[in-house]
């Protein structure tokens, strides 16, 4: 089977270009500080293959690596709020009453959710 230079394979969400014939070599000279800067940027992008990094930068001009820790925290808060709401609903169905403390707890959880969402939106707006 012959694959063209644009043959792409996705494995576990990662893109691999398979059986691409690369017979053109482009050489560049770098200072030590330039090489060190490239190595630092590769590490920040989570890429260990220098040739792949250089090819990506030459063809696309940039690599974006996003930090989703705030989103993960918001999802955690959302799960907590959902669990609390389910517990209140269960208790209300069993006892036919809702306690003020339960309502206050739900309000506090939703306030934390909105604060987390605001932080994320502000960071996205700065991009």
Image (spheres, grey):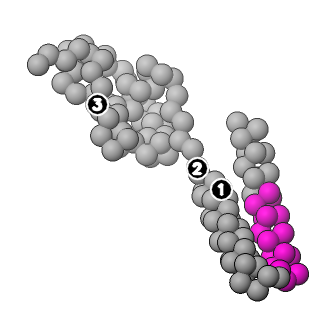
Give the CA distance from mark 1 to mark 2.
8 Å
Instruction: Indicate the position of residue 82 as horizontal and vertical percent values.
Output: 67, 66
Quadrant containing the N terminus in the rendered view: top left
Which residue is situated farthest in the left direction here? 1
The residue lying at 43 percent from left, 31 percent from top is 31
Q: Are marks 1 and 2 in contact (CB under 8 Å)?
A: yes
Q: Earlier in the sequence, mark 2 or mark 3?
A: 3
Instruction: Indicate the position of residue 49 as horizontal and vertical percent values.
Output: 32, 38
The residue lying toward the viewer, choosing from 72 and 95, is 95
Instruction: Indicate the position of residue 117 as horizontal and vertical percent values.
Output: 75, 53
Secondary structure beneath dot 1 equals helix
Q: Which mark is residue 67?
A: 2
Secondary structure beneath dot 3 equals strand
Is the magenta region chiefly helix, strand or loop?
helix
Count of all numbered marks drawn on residues in the image: 3
Other-residue count near label 1 (Cα within 10 Å), few / some / many at <14 / 14–19 / ≥20: some
Quadrant containing the C terminus in the rendered view: top right
Q: Are marks 2 and 3 in contact (CB under 8 Å)?
A: no
The residue lying at 36 percent from left, 21 percent from top is 28
Does 39 sit left or right of 118 as displayed? left
Compared to residue 36, the image places residue 115 above or below, namely: below
The residue singled out by tag 3 in the image is 9
Does 24 sit left or right of 64 as displayed? left
The residue lying toward the viewer, choosing from 84 and 59, is 84
2 or 3: mark nearer the eye:
3
116 magenta-colored:
no
The residue singled out by tag 1 in the image is 70
Quarter of the image for residue 51 reads top left
The residue lying toward the viewer, choosing from 45 and 79, is 79
Q: Which residues are magenta?
A: 98-115
């Amino acid at each position: 089977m012959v694959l063209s230079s644009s043959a792409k394979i996705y494995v576990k969400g990662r893109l691999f270009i398979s059986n691409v014939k690369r017979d053109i070599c482009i050489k560049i000279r770098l200072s030590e500080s330039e090489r060190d800067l490239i190595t630092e940027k590769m590490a920040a992008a989570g890429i260990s293959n220098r040739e792949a990094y250089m090819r990506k930068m030459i063809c696309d001009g940039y690599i974006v690596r996003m930090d989703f820790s705030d989103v993960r925290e918001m999802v955690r808060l959302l799960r907590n709020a959902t669990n609390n709401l389910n517990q209140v609903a269960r208790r209300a169905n069993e006892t036919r009453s809702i306690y003020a403390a339960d309502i206050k707890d739900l309000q506090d959880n939703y306030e934390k959710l909105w604060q987390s969402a605001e932080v994320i939106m502000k960071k996205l707006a700065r991009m």
